[in-house]
Amino acid sequence: MAPKEEFGSDYAANQIARQRNPLRKLIKSFYVSRVVRHVTGPTIDLGCGAGQILERLPPGSLGIEVNPYLVSYLAARGFRVLPAVASNTGFDLSQVKKNEFKNLVLSHVLEHFDNASQVLGALLRDCSKLGIETVIIVVPGANGYRSDATHKTFVTMDYLRQCAMMDCEGFCLAEHSYFPLDFKFIGELFIYHELMLVYKPKI
């Protein structure tokens, strides 16, 4: 499960302040843009935080968030958002209707699990059952991973290969890229470097 501090009001206030900061919002927009360009139609933002990605998603999209203060904040802003339900497999999508959403985004969440490969496998299995066609995962680079004590698994391309996650539960890894600058080594130097994974159904 997610670290307990992520359930608190202090964490929520910090996330909201970051989301409202004009400079941070401008910089974050470049990161968000590379995610939403893979999105067509209603999308689930799983672990939506303060809504930086959610606010850029198409109409009919849904945010799911573990922090109740952020759920209330987003609902007050008019977003469709649901509280996350605890699950032994990491995520519970039982409140989602089949064929309602085309995409799912999981941004800077997977690294918080010590069993990330099992969590990702279960998530892909659920997405297949729900008719979701694109699953977008974003995880931090090396420096970003080391910067947060709540991070449990460093998700890399090597990790995915070792855990047989390139082709899993009816999905295959169709695309991966690093940002900013599409080079893995930048992650050793720059804390805000990240890896994006795009899973599509196997043909």
Image: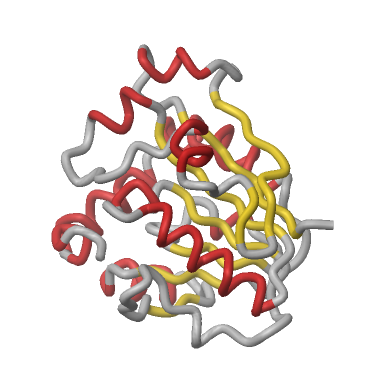
Residue depicted at x 20% and y 66%:
7
Vertical arrangement, residue 20 with respect to residue 127, above or below = above
- Say left or right for 41 vs 187: right
Q: Which residue is drawn at 41% across and 71% down?
A: 91
Describe residue 138's horizontal placement relative to residue 70 as left or right. right
Direction right: furthest residue: 203
* Picture coordinates of residue 152, whole percent (x, y): 25, 45
When the figure is inspected, residue 175 is found, relative to residue 184, above or below; the finding is below
* Nearer the observer, 15 or 152: 152
Which quarter of the figure has residue 2? bottom left
Q: In which quarter of the image is residue 58?
A: bottom right
Q: Residue at x 53, y 77 (%)?
A: 80
Q: Nearer the viewer, residue 171 or 74?
A: 171
Q: In this view, does 4 lie to the left or right of 189?
A: left
The N terminus sits in image quarter: bottom left
Residue at 32%, 70% (x, y): give it.
66
In this rendering, the answer to whether 93 lies above or below 7 is below
Q: Is residue 168 above or below residue 38?
A: below
Which residue is more in the foreground, 182 or 67?
182
Residue 123 position in % (x across, y down): 51, 66
Where residue 194 appears, as percent x and y from the top left, is 47, 31
Who is closer to the viewer here, 172 or 132? 172
Q: Where is residue 184 in the image (x, y as percent from the top left)?
A: 50, 19
Q: How is the image coloured?
A: secondary structure
- Number of marks drawn: 0
- On the rendered image, what quadrant is the C terminus found in? bottom right
* Quadrant position of residue 142: top left
